[in-house]
């Protein structure tokens, strides 16, 4: 390894060098595979939010998030990430159910959000009704939780069912 100006002379020294080089290559391959696995999980929403030191975070969930309602989400995030209070921008953890909703929300973030705020938004697949999912999004340490109703009528459930779901979300988050 290197330019060859220093090389082991003995058989034992060469064997140790070969072992160290092989171990390094194997270790690097294993760690790279683990990193790619974690990155893939995060891309598909099955990872977890890791709170950064000295940074607060908020939770965003509800029917409007499920449907990726552009008008409501644009209004929320433009206020949350307004340039006048950039020093206090929180991370946002968006909790949605189903891979289709994860993809819609990730597309919304890529297309509608500024490049400065994109890295501050984590989209996770899950339900606020499941304790494990609330743990994955660090619910206990969240600054706020926004539960946004779908007012567009684009979901298959009616207004009463949407209200019921939002009440359950609120109770579940409050319980945790």
Image (cartoon, grey):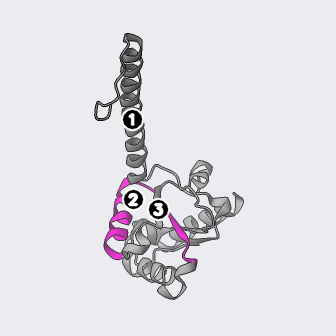
- Is residue 99 within the magenta segment? yes
Q: Which mark is residue 102?
A: 2
Picture quadrant of residue 30: top left
Classify mark 3: helix, strand or loop. strand
Q: Is residue 111 visible?
A: yes
Indicate the position of residue 148 as horizontal and vertical percent values.
Answer: 52, 74
Q: Nearer the viewer, mark 2 or mark 3?
A: 3
Q: Of marks 2 and 1, which one's residue comes earlier in the chain? A: 1
Picture quadrant of residue 108: bottom left
**Residue at numbered disc 1:** 28
Q: CA distance from mark 2 to mark 1?
A: 31 Å
Between 167 and 52, the one lying in front of the other is: 52
Indicate the position of residue 102 as horizontal and vertical percent values.
Answer: 39, 59
Q: Residues within 10 Å of mark 1 (few under 14, many from 20)?
A: few
Query: Which residue is located at x 28 percent, y 35 percent?
Result: 3
How many marks the image carries: the answer is 3
Q: Is residue 173 left or right of residue 37?
A: right
**Residue at numbered disc 3:** 122
Indicate the position of residue 159 as horizontal and vertical percent values.
Answer: 49, 74
Secondary structure predominantly adopted by residues drawn in magenta: helix
Query: Which residue is located at x 38 percent, y 13 percent?
Result: 10
Indicate the position of residue 174 as horizontal and vertical percent values.
Answer: 69, 64
Q: Nearer the viewer, mark 2 or mark 1?
A: 1
Q: Is residue 133 left or right of residue 143?
A: left
Magenta residues span 88-112
- Is residue 43 within the magenta segment? no
Locate the N terminus by quadrant: top left
Q: CA distance from mark 2 to mark 3?
A: 10 Å
Residue pushed farthest right? 175
Q: Nearer the viewer, mark 1 or mark 3?
A: 1
């Amino acid at each position: 390894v290197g330019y060859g100006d220093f090389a082991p002379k003995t058989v034992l020294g060469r064997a140790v060098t070969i072992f160290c080089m092989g171990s390094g290559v194997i270790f690097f391959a294993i760690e790279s595979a683990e990193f790619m696995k974690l990155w893939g999980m995060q891309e598909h929403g099955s990872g977890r939010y890791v709170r950064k030191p000295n940074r607060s975070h908020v939770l965003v969930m509800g029917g409007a998030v499920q449907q990726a309602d552009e008008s409501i989400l644009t209004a929320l995030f433009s206020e949350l990430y307004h340039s006048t209070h950039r020093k206090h921008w929180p991370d946002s953890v968006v909790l949605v159910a189903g891979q289709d909703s994860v993809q819609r929300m990730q597309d919304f973030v890529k297309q509608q959000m500024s490049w400065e705020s994109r890295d501050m938004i984590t989209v996770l697949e899950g339900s606020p009704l499941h304790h494990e999912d609330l743990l994955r999004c660090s619910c206990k340490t969240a600054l706020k939780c926004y539960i946004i109703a779908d007012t567009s009528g684009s979901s298959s459930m009616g207004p009463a069912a949407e209200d019921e779901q939002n009440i359950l979300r609120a109770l579940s988050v409050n319980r945790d």
